[in-house]
Amino acid sequence: MPTTPRAILATQEVDAQAPFPFSAIVGQDDMKLAFLIAAIDPSVGGVLVFGDRGTGKSTAVRALARLLPLMHAVADCAYNCDPADTAALCDNCRKRKSKAHMRAVPVVDMPLGATEDRVVGALDLERALTRGEKAFEPGLLARANRGFLYIDEVNLLEDHLVDLLLDVAASGENVVEREGLSIRHPARFVLIGSGNPEEGELRPQLLDRFGLAVDVKTPTDVATRVDVVRRRDAFERDPVRFHRAWAGEEQKLRRRIDAARARVADVETPDAALEKSARLCIALGSDGLRGELTLLRAARALAAFEGEATVGDAELRRVAPFALGHRLRRNPLDDVGSTVRVERAIDEIFGP
């Protein structure tokens, strides 16, 4: 029997540079679940992870990339265009016929000190100097199209780059007009951000663009800390052997993600779930309707992951802190955190 591209990805030979396996990450269940939800339904809107240093934030992002199924893309396109989505093709793909191939979903790191040219793209100086041609050199946004854009220390990002990301996130395309170039290309990606809240807050406009937000903390019990250190030490001493030991768990998780992505569109959302979502958002005083939409999409993705056909109270309760906690107005008369406020409202709407 011929091996399918997806099977090739699942059984590919592990090298010493492969990231730490996602399924081997100890604890941090909220963070892992938020990433899985974003992988199942990218329309949820991305994930923000704030917390202590050394709690596995970057490790989880890079590990997630190996779990994602392969995607169809135009073989020689710099923007990973989907040949089946003719409305979202770039100008080059519209003008010519090209072969499609299977490739890994891109997970692109955006360094904190990245220049605007590196992010959006710029004039290809080599071709300009050697051939006298004006050509566009795609940036990080082009590489991240149809994938994930990861920004570590996102709360330290410069304001002009924040404004740029907000524009692209709202429109789904990147427009570059400079040095005689006028380029427009698709830039639809899942934004993943991480940071340490002690180093500064995130601008409210960018915070609102993240569908889910999770706080992670350093584990305080001895057993968990010992397990973390033991697994990390085993991975660093012999990464190939460690990956082989966890290959079965990785394959199970990959299949669950695949199955959830296939069934998420068929998960039903009854009126009772819609009403409770609305009542919960009203009780919390969240602005706009983005919170309710994100809550429902995340609950639907969780139901698909768990093999449920309908969104119920259990799914709404589980994802509500992720979807709503970062959207609350600050109450100067209430000194508890947003997580506690969400939990109170959940108990009021759903019962303790």
Image (cartoon, rainbow, N blue to C red):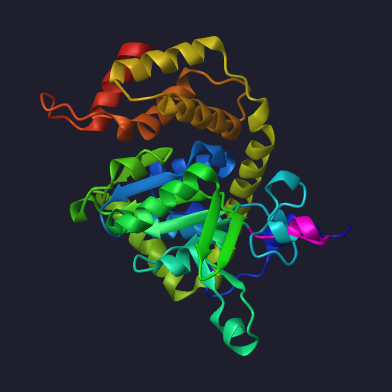
Query: In the image, residue 61 lies at what x, y percent?
Result: 46, 56
Query: In the image, residue 54 lies at what x, y percent?
Result: 30, 60
Residue 85 in view, yes or no? no
Task: Decide: is 181 above or below 323.
Answer: below
Query: In the image, residue 70 lies at what x, y percent?
Result: 69, 55
Could you tell whether 275 is left or right of 134 in the image?
left
Question: Which is nearer the eye, 230 or 91?
Answer: 91
The count of marks equals 0
Could you tell whether 286 is left or right of 340 in the image?
right
| Residue at the extreme front | 180
Task: Decide: is 289 above or below 213.
Answer: above
Residue 225 in view, yes or no? yes
| Residue at 54% over, 81% down | 125
Question: Which is nearer the eye, 134 or 50?
Answer: 134
Residue 61 belongs to magenta span: no
| Residue at 76% over, 55% down | 94
Figure quadrant of the N terminus = bottom right
The quadrant where residue 127 appears = bottom right
Figure quadrant of the C terminus = top left
| Residue at 83% over, 60% down | 97
**From which residue to which does the magenta span run?**
93-104
| Residue at 75% over, 58% down | 93
Could you tell whether 299 is left or right of 231 in the image?
right
| Residue at the extreme bottom | 130
The quadrant where residue 143 appears = bottom right
Query: In the image, residue 209 lies at what x, y percent?
Result: 41, 41
